[in-house]
Amino acid sequence: MPTYDLVVIGAGPVGENVADRATQGGLTAVIVEAELVGGECSYWACMPSKALLTPIMALDAARAVDGAKQAVTGSLDVEAVLARRDKFVEHFDDSGQVSWLTSAGIDLVRGHGRISGVREVTVTDSGGVETVLTARHAVAVCTGTTATIPAVPGLTETKPWTSREATSAHKIPASLIILGGGVVATEMATAYAAFGSSVTVLSRSELLGGLEPFAGEMVSAHLKEAGADIRIGASPVSVHRSNGVVTVELPDGETLTADEFLVATGRTPASSDIGLDTIGLESGGYLKVDETMRVQAVPEGWLYAVGDVNGRVLLTHQGKYQARAAGDVIAARALGGAVDDAAWGKHVATADQASVPAVVFTQPEIGTVGLTAAKAEKAYANIKVVDYEIGNVAGAHLHADDYVGKARMVVDTDREVIVGMTFVGPEVGEMIHSATIAVVGQVRISRLWHAVPSYPTMSEIWLRLLETYGR
């Protein structure tokens, strides 16, 4: 039985980081992976989706500046976009990622891993051969999530697209119906409308409902301008495919048809077939963890769940943040080192609570960190909301002759610190980290006045927000 200090199930960015930090801390580690090393983000989510969207944004950016737009004489080259996407996913060849594991001193066992006992994982490869791995100290579950398929009559039999098919497609459908109104739905609606598909979005509520309302409204307006049909409050009662055509029946009896149907209604934890029942845990749900990513239901403390599978924050960068803390604390506990598990300590993921940054790569782009105004009202006794049109900042006009965007700053006035920030507009994603630093660092408004933004840049929005807030 091969024995390691740490056995990691799942070789996505989260699993890689857990193993890497543990090995840097002096432990031996092995990763188990049934698909491609690099995981969902590298091949079917973050990277390919942004590779699809970036050329669209670059073309729009050129067309928004006089002097440059006159040079744009053609339309989007969709085949070139798809070819560029293929380069980003290495044509689904993970040899580069495998080489990195080797260089980091991390072993790899390919196959489906299941917990088969205390600190034990049995791996079954594609030929049915089993390998039993034992861990001296810890097992880390980093299996992520899978696309949720809602219980709509006929939907499963239709073989709908999920985010995987949408980001890896090599043929653009003439028409596409998208079920959902979140990040995946809006990003893929942005992409496929630009590719020339006739796009229809069916969403039970307003688009991007977890963000500030104006963010979803601005994205919805752009999608409509791009020719997309946005149906709010629409949920299909049945879906079926015949002769290659998907037919969707709506509650009022109306039917819609399309070449493809994309389901983007959320994610389900990939924990249903990893052997949790062998150690007395329920399969199929999120694994509840403490602040150091240890599974609370396992009192012996050897099982960790890191990244999306624990349900804390379903974002790759936040999962990698958790992984750094988990890998370090696994090594510390194994070697008898000190554990720094107080808030904002080395071995905890405190930022998961109310300091999470995110970027939505729609048109317009959205950058957020912390709480929305609605959530801040529930969390704090006194808040102040400051809005400002980014287009009124001089630097914004250098990016687009008619820049349209909006910023919102949410301040806890008792402490005089920012607890939430939202930017909506072209290229705002690159500005959100400055807000993240302010939120995580709990920098007081009085000190932020001394953080002088360079002129003329879009970052001057910070000065305008502070002026609107007042000294």
Image (tube, grey):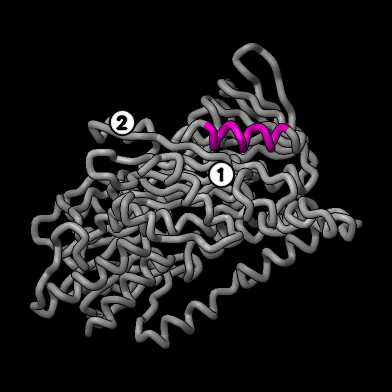
User: On the image, which quarter does residue 227 sit in?
Assistant: top right
Percent x, y for residue 271?
Answer: 33, 51
Percent x, y for residue 10?
Answer: 38, 65
Residues rendered magenta in the picture: 214-224
Percent x, y for residue 377?
Answer: 31, 31
Return the residue at label 1: 424
Of marks 1 and 2, which one's residue comes earlier in the chain?
2
Camera-side residue of 206 and 307: 206
Camera-side residue of 278 and 394: 394
Q: Residue at x 18, y 53 (%)?
A: 290
Percent x, y for residue 365?
Answer: 59, 48
Report whether 113 appears left or right of 460: left
**Helix, strand or loop at disc 1?**
strand
Work out whether residue 181 can be spotted: no
Q: Quadrant of the C terminus?
A: top left
Please name the amino acid that badge 2 sits on: Glu
Q: Residue at x 69, y 36 (%)?
A: 223
Report whether 247 appears left or right of 357: right
Distance (Cα) linking label 1 and label 2: 21 Å
Please name the amino acid that badge 1 sits on: Val
Within-10-Å neighbours for mark 2: few <14, some 14–19, many 20+: some
Res 377 label? 2
- For residue 349, above or below residue 284: below
**Answer yes or no: do the residues labelled 1 and 2 have beta carbons within 8 Å?**
no
Work out whether residue 39 can be spotted: yes
